[in-house]
């Protein structure tokens, strides 16, 4: 492991807003913040929005800046990636953004029933050629999300993958979820979204900027499971 990664891992441990539960806490449902994020971590009752597979946390940070009246939590297993977003939160003193380092498979051990108001899936790995149960919009993951989402909670997928977008739309239709929005060219169709959604969709990750420069189109869909 590189020296820089080790430095980032060590610095993560000094950040109050980076939570790294143990495997025992997740596997045996012993995580102390489950059901208590608002009260014990953020100190308020504001809605909680998750970014699953957050990478460097650009979306969590961007949303946190736009909406101080909401709480945002980026979830990823890669500590070196989380460090970048966590460092920005520390430097800019953003009070409503946190990062949780854990596997998304353990999401129901991290949050209580109806604790989450919305979920963002930003540029998730489409897992082409692998078991569909590993895709973050598969039925097995949607069932997990339903255990933590408030009634009517929305799932939003922003993706560079046509494959994952098609798969997600098939899941929405096949399981009778309510489709709210769909676009195969977010930036080419931006004017048709409401102003709030335009603000959110205009948050761009590092890699997204590169893809756009190459002429690649970005997909988006929102649905209620």
Image: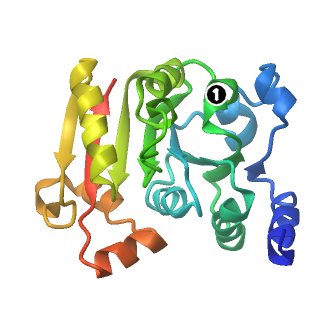
- The residue at 63%/65% (across/down) is 85
Along the horizontal axis of the image, is 145 left or right of 14?
A: left
Where residue 122 appears, as percent x and y from the top left, is: 44, 52
Q: Quadrant of the C terminus?
A: top left
Considering the numbered disc 1 on the image, is that residue within a helix, a strand or a loop?
Answer: loop
Q: Is residue 210 above or below residue 219?
A: below
Determine which residue is flagged by label 1: 111
- The residue at 27%/22% (across/down) is 177
Mark 1 Cα shell of 10 Å, populated few (<14), some (14-19), many (≥20): many
Residue 32 visible to the viewer: no
Q: Quadrant of residue 22?
A: top right
Counting every numbered tag in the picture gives: 1
Q: Quadrant of the N terminus?
A: bottom right
Q: Quadrant of residue 57?
A: bottom right
Where residue 197 appears, as percent x and y from the top left, is: 27, 53
Q: Nearer the viewer, residue 60 or 46?
A: 60
Along the horizontal axis of the image, is 161 left or right of 182?
A: right
């Amino acid at each position: 492991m590189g020296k820089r990664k080790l430095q980032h891992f060590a610095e993560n441990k000094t950040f109050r807003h980076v939570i790294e539960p143990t495997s025992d806490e997740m596997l045996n449902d012993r995580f102390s913040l489950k059901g208590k994020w608002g009260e014990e971590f953020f100190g308020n009752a504001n809605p909680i929005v998750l970014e699953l597979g957050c990478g460097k946390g650009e979306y969590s940070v961007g949303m946190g800046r736009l909406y101080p009246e909401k709480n945002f939590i980026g979830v990823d297993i890669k500590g070196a990636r989380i460090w970048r977003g966590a460092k920005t939160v520390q430097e800019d003193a953003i009070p409503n953004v946190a990062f949780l380092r854990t596997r998304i498979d353990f999401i129901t051990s991290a949050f209580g029933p109806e604790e989450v108001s919305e979920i963002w899936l930003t540029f998730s790995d489409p897992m082409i050629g692998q078991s569909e149960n590993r895709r973050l919009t598969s039925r097995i993951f949607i069932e997990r999300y339903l255990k933590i989402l408030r009634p009517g909670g929305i799932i939003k997928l922003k993706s560079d993958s046509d494959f994952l977008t098609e798969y997600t739309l098939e899941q929405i239709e096949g399981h009778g979820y309510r489709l709210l929005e769909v676009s195969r060219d977010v930036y080419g169709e931006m004017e048709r979204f409401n102003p709030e959604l335009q603000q959110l969709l205009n948050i761009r990750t590092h890699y997204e900027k590169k893809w756009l420069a190459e002429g690649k189109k970005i997909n988006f869909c929102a649905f209620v499971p």
